[in-house]
Amino acid sequence: MTGMREFLVNYVNIGCGDPCGDQIASHGILLVGAFRSNEKNDGFIKTVNSIEQSEKAKVTKLAIGELAQDDIGKLLSAKLCLPIRYTKKLAELVSSKSGGNPFFIV
């Protein structure tokens, strides 16, 4: 999965036995985490797997790849309300600086 980034969305229902915890348990919490698959993060992965296996939370994992320069150009064009031909040079610069990582672009 070279060039892909893991993105974790975790909806957790927890209760801790106090009024605050009961309120949280009835409404839930949305936790979002991100990590790079090429970095050493065994502790994080073990924690996520433990939560997932406990079935106390629903864990959804999404793999997000790098954006191509053309896609960056389209994104910039839409955000800046300019034709793509005007954002081409900026897209080249953003692509070279970000490596296509969508978390660095938005």
Image (spheres, rainbow, N blue to C red):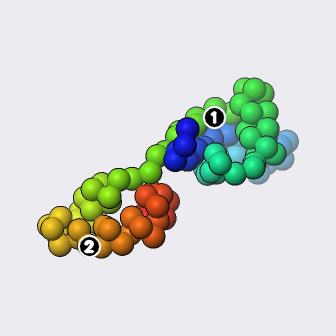
Q: Which amino acid does label 1 sit on?
A: Val
Q: In which quarter of the image is the N terminus?
A: top right
| Residue 89 circle label | 2
Q: Which of 102 and 12 is in front in this view?
A: 102
Q: What residue type is labelled 2?
A: Lys
**Residue 94: x %, y % from top left:** 38, 69
Q: How crowded is mark 2: few (under 14 residues within 10 Å), some or many (20 or more)?
A: few
| Residue 100 circle label | none
**Residue 86: x %, y % from top left:** 17, 72
Q: Nearer the viewer, residue 106 or 27?
A: 106
Q: Is residue 28 left or right of residue 87?
A: right
User: In which quadrant of the rendered view does residue 51 lie?
Assistant: top right
Q: Residues within 10 Å of mark 1 (few under 14, many from 20)?
A: some
Q: Name the residue under label 1.
A: 59
Name which residue lies at 79% across and 43% down. Answer: 42
On screen, residue 81 above or below 70: below
Name which residue lies at 52% across and 47% down. Answer: 3
Q: Which of 13 and 23 is in front in this view?
A: 13
Q: Quadrant of the C terminus?
A: bottom left
Name which residue lies at 18% across and 64% down. Answer: 84
Furthest-right residue in this view: 17
Q: Is residue 23 visible?
A: no
